[in-house]
Amino acid sequence: MSDPENPTPLQHEDLAAVERLTQAFVGLRAEMGKIIVGQQDVLEELLIAIFARGHCLLIGVPGLAKTLMIHTLADALNLSFNRIQFTPDLMPSDITGTEVIQEDKATGVRQFKFLRGPIFSNLILADEINRTPPKTQAALLEAMQERQATVGGERHRLPDPFFVLATQNPIEQEGTYPLPEAQLDRFMLNILVDYPTEDEELEVVRVTTSAKPPSVEKVLSGDDILELQQVVRKVPVAEHVGRYAVRLARMTRPGQAEAPQFVRDFVSWGAGPRASQYLVLAAKARAVLQGRPYVAVEDIRSVAGPVLRHRIVTNFNAEAEGLRPDDLITRLIQSLPADPSEAIEGGRVPKLFKSADAG
């Protein structure tokens, strides 16, 4: 019987794949750096989602190169790319495609032919996703979850790998259709894109006003990504690390016994079980990108913000106090010990950190 605290390590070929992914991460950062200045944390979180087979929601004001970043990433990964500008008049068929009647000139026979929409691509940029009505948002949701598009009662498989990277403007909310919590939950990570530093902004000006923009070299292919996604899922997780992720997610729910008082005071709804899954998956991807064939509690803590911030619904009390979900996540991390030995109370280890064999 395997030890929960020392799960089965990766095989030799998987370790080689981990090293390859780590090197690819270095190469991707170098190639992206030719076009995108700074934003290293954003790039790492994007790659975490891609290698964990997830989708991302990027939140940032206009002009922070979100579109350029995603397009450059598609080029470096050698993936097909389509950008969909979401508008109030966009219809589901504008995304998925439609059926048209086509006549065979030789026989005169008419038949339906499916014309694929922009969703049939490896990497989709859903620009300003909250500007389109719920019906169109739902069509994108099916593609994200089922990796297929249904048109005229017929299902059409989407290419593999398939990622949706959606953007939202946090400032202008007039005339928008906010994504329901159930749809937000489908996004693995919620990534905040902030302003660059002064030196970074100066470099942006220098690069973008030069005569010839640099070109980006291909670092990985679609097949490489599919192979490395499987390696990420094989990364072992010790039980105390997995339980840390589960406890962190459960502590966001005001109705749970584990929830601290500040969560009961400021949170209406907490993160569901999908958050626990994504905490572990994202931590696995981060560990591999960092060159480690195992997951540490620090990996869980590092991905907690992008995994949890769109899954915590704060109440009026939090708004009155000026508290954001990120503030509460920081307090949760500070209140939950990283080391099981730190949580010893009354001479015994709490049930959270007991191994399966300990009963």
Image: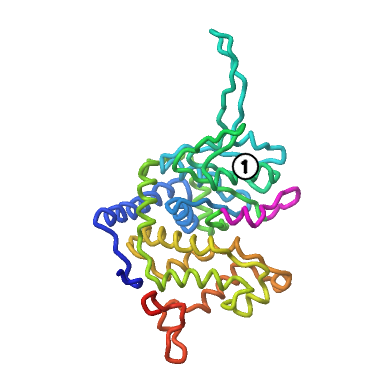
Is residue 50 shown left or right of residue 288? right
Residue 119 visible, this angle: yes
Image point (45%, 63%), residue name: 280
Image point (39%, 69%), residue name: 296
At mark 1, the secondary structure is helix
Task: Look at the magenta stretch and give its main secondary structure.
Answer: loop
Q: Is residue 94 above or below residue 125?
A: above
Image point (54%, 65%), residue name: 305
Residue stretch in magenta: 171-186
Residue 219 visible, this angle: no
Is residue 193 shown left or right of residue 295? right
Q: Position of residue 300 (x, y in %)?
A: 46, 67
Judge by depth and name the residue closer to the eye, 110 or 76: 110
* Quadrant into which the N terminus falls: bottom left
Residue positioned most to the top? 106
Judge by depth and name the residue closer to the eye, 48 or 198: 48
**What colour scheme was applied to this rendering of the protein?**
rainbow
Image point (35%, 73%), residue name: 5
The residue labelled by disc 1 is: 139
Kind of residue indicated by mark 1 = Ala
Q: Is residue 275 above or below residue 83?
A: below
Q: Position of residue 55 (x, y in %)?
A: 52, 51
Q: Position of residue 59 (x, y in %)?
A: 60, 54
Indicate whether residue 179 is drawn in magenta: yes
Indicate whether residue 64 is drawn in magenta: no
Few, some or many C-alpha atoms within 10 Å of disc 1 (few <14, some 14-19, many ≥20)?
some
Judge by depth and name the residue closer to the eye, 19 or 257: 257
Residue positioned most to the bottom? 346
